[in-house]
Amino acid sequence: MNNRGWFRNGMLALGLAFLYIPILSMMFFSFNNSRLVTVWDAENSPTLRWYVRLLENDQLLGAAWISVQVAAMTATGAVILGTLAGLVLARFGPFRGRAFLSAMTTAPLVMPEVITGIAMLLLFVSLEQLIGWPEGRGMLTIIIAHITFAMAYVTVVIQSRLAGFDDALEEAALDLGAKPATVFFRITLPLIVPALVSGWLLAFTLSWDDVVISQFVSGPGSSTLPMEIFSRVRRGVSPDINALATIMVLIVAVGVVLSTLYMKREEKRRLREEQMARSGS
Amino acid sequence: MKKALVTLQSLAGKRLVIGVPYVWLLLFFAIPFLIVFKISFSWMQPIQPGYAPLLAWVEETQRFVATLNFSNYQALLQDSLYLSTFLYSVKVAAISTVFCLLVGYPMAYAIARCAPSTRNLLLMLIILPFWTSFLLRVYAWIGLLKTNGVINNTLLALGVIDEPLTLLYTDFAVYIGIVYSYLPFMILPLYSNLEKHDLTLLEAASDLGASPMKAFFKVTLPLSMPGVVAGCLLVFIPAVGEFVIPSLLGRTDQLMIGTVLSAQFFGARNWPVASAVAIVLLLMLLLPILLFQRYQRRELEAAKR
């Protein structure tokens, strides 16, 4: 390895340290007995007292449950709408309004959340004035708002997956007389299953993580977990938030490892099947 | 005849497939902006819904009377607070974007030049923090930066400093927060660009006598410009309107525009002024957003084989 190699790897190592040290430090201090959080109390640490206190905190647990429901429904809705949009943009060729649809699916990727938040809330308020729906704000309005920005991400995932595939298979099936719907369910859908899974997980995470948009469109009694966390951490560091962060990081790490293993297995299976198809068996 | 029927059916099906996401985005993404635009010309009203209607039925004249209120925009222009807030937000976002590029480019470059087997692992390591809570990652920096936080305690223990540095609630803290939160958004487009480079070009440059440094600035950097632009836009645009990071790590004497907008909305409950702020912010970001869309379109077209 030459000098430049060392420089490159050194920068990479520094960057990774920058990414991980804050998270590791947060996890480390969740076992600290001291209320001061970052001043290590060597006598009485490590301790699990903040984890115990966390599990007794019904407000946070309730908010977490709301967040799980919102995120699961958001992810499902976003995958359905995002798959349709991705399919339309990748496969339907030119049609009137295509450019506008494409613009509406990329704008949410970079739109500052405060703008999306205020726009959503004013829409819900106006709709309620106009047709009486949605009545007040709560989980439903949060889910609608989350689906809208999460589906943009799913669309990109699906669109790029479809763009990477040749449409010869679909063409062939159509030529053999299969209905477009049959082609979609029997050919296109199985091909994009990995993209659907990663799209779902991505939408789930985006919803689970969102605080700004939720804050605009939520109502009384529908505080999500990030909203609860935000109102707490604005008052400074608190040891039970460190404990909560540790639990969340561990869940995510396990989830990411599992889904990576799943993707690897799917990819292998696909390659094997392709090989079998080629060998003509 | 049957064929015509099938074509007709598939045409209707096609319309439906296009229609569902289209109508959804139209209703929940495009129309809300028109409503914000409308309300930005309205007056604040203490009763529900919090803003006055623009169009009112006047009994005496038996006519609809439309009234537009430009004072919200006038307030933005005249009040120097708003101007300084907008400028400050752009400054913070721009500086953070530059830092993000300086940190992200070498990392993306290093990953792209790694053995293919380790690339995926490294990319996963970059993305992994992104899957954990954004809010908690920003929160982690409070613990590091505060007066009796990890960094100050470490430096004090090592004897580098005699008294704690003020790190939290400064511009510096906001830069760190933005770089930290948005780094994957910088690295991923850069990586996907750098990974595609033809390395024989560098060999050619070296054969022709260019130093590695010169080859980098003459070949690699210009070729990677689309990735640089995309990464910078993905960081800069949302950072201008950032709300969580400055309210947790930032100064209290100089607010960012996202914070002012939420304060007008939730604190003062002045929805028309908040709407006007949102519209001005949107207009400011329109050009970068259009640029980003152009890049995204090209990227997806290039993915087609």
Image: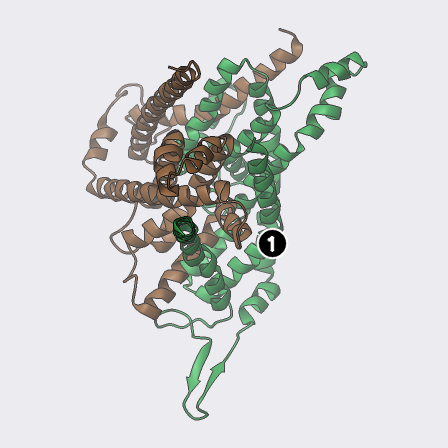
Chain colours: A brown, B green
Q: Nearer the viewer, residue B29 or A47?
A: B29
The answer to whether residue A152 is above or below residue A127 is: above
Position in image of residue B70 (x %, y %): 56, 72
Front-most of B275 and B24?
B24
Residue situated furthest front in the rendering: B1
Q: Residue at x 69, y 24 (%)?
A: B220
Q: How many marks?
A: 1
Left or right side of B167 for A224: left
Image x and y of residue A155, in percent: 45, 41
Q: Which element carries disc 1, helix, strand or loop? A: helix
Q: Within the image, what quadrant is residue A178 found in?
A: top left
Say which chain tag 1 marks. Answer: B
Q: Is residue B74 left or right of residue A181?
A: right
Furthest residue in direction right, as rendered? B209
Left or right for B279, reference A258: right
The residue shown at (35%, 21%) is A257
Residue depicted at 32% across the width and 68% down the height: A131
Instruction: Locate residue B205: give its quadrant.
Output: top right
Q: Is residue B101 left or right of residue A239?
A: right
Q: Which residue is drawn at 62% across and 45% down?
A: B291
For disc 1, the marked residue is B284
The amino acid sitting under disc 1 is Met
User: Is residue B17 shown above or below B163?
Assistant: below
Where does the image place residue B77, in percent across and percent down from the top left? 61, 64
In this view, B178 is above or below A5: below
- Kindly tell me whether residue B255 is visible in this rendering: no
The single residue placed furthest to the bottom in the displayed view is B60
